[in-house]
Amino acid sequence: MAGAHKTIAAPRHLFSDTKAAGASTAGMKAYLAAALIAPLTAACAIIPDTPRGNGDAASQGSAVAIGSPVWAGDAILTPLAIIEDTRCPADVQCFHGGELTVSTRIAATHWTQTAPLTLGDPYEVMGRTYVLATAAPLPTAGGDIPAGDYRFVFERQ
């Protein structure tokens, strides 16, 4: 019996209808894929597409103090410190209006930057434009404004 091979053939009824066999295989592949993916997606956390902030940020358009975050479009802006306030005092007539510049943290979903924002001047970062729109109070000839008395309104343009 040297050289004799015995061939085993699958029963014909298993693959007599090739369309049915293909559908069965495709269905099994889909089931297997779903069975493998389901445990992976169940373990995923849903993280909102918003910037991180320490506590609640004020709503857009709100006047905020130093250290208080506020929404401006899809970012959170936080005034950190007064860099300079050379604005003309309210009770004095000046030839030059002066400037107010505030160190401001701008935090969006995947980035954070600290930038000097000057009152009324647009500041562009990551394709977005922000402006320090208003600041109060106005200086007086009598002296400096305590940092805690300032209030700022930021806008996204």
Image (cartoon, helix red, strand yellow):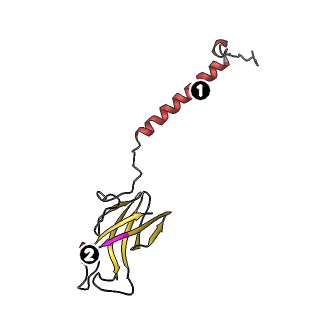
Mark number displayed over residue 26: 1
**Of residues 44 and 67, which is closer to you in this image?**
67
Which region of the structure is painted magenta?
133-139
Q: Residue at x 32, y 76 (%)?
A: 82
Position of the N terminus by quadrant: top right
Pick out the residue farthest to the right: 3
Q: Is residue 135 magenta?
A: yes
- Alpha carbon separation for disc pair 2 and 1: 69 Å
Task: Describe the element under mark 2 as helix, strand or loop.
Answer: helix
- Quadrant in the rendering for residue 4: top right
**Of residues 66 and 59, which is closer to you in this image?**
59
Q: Position of residue 60 (x, y in %)?
A: 35, 59
Residue under pointer 2: 147
Mark number displayed over residue 80: none
Under mark 2, the amino acid is Ala
Question: Could you tell which of marks 2 and 1 lies nearer the N-terminus?
Answer: 1
Count of marks overlaid on the render: 2
Q: Position of residue 59 (x, y in %)?
A: 32, 57
Task: Describe the element under mark 1 as helix, strand or loop.
Answer: helix
Q: Residues within 10 Å of mark 2 (few under 14, many from 20)?
A: few
Under mark 1, the amino acid is Ala
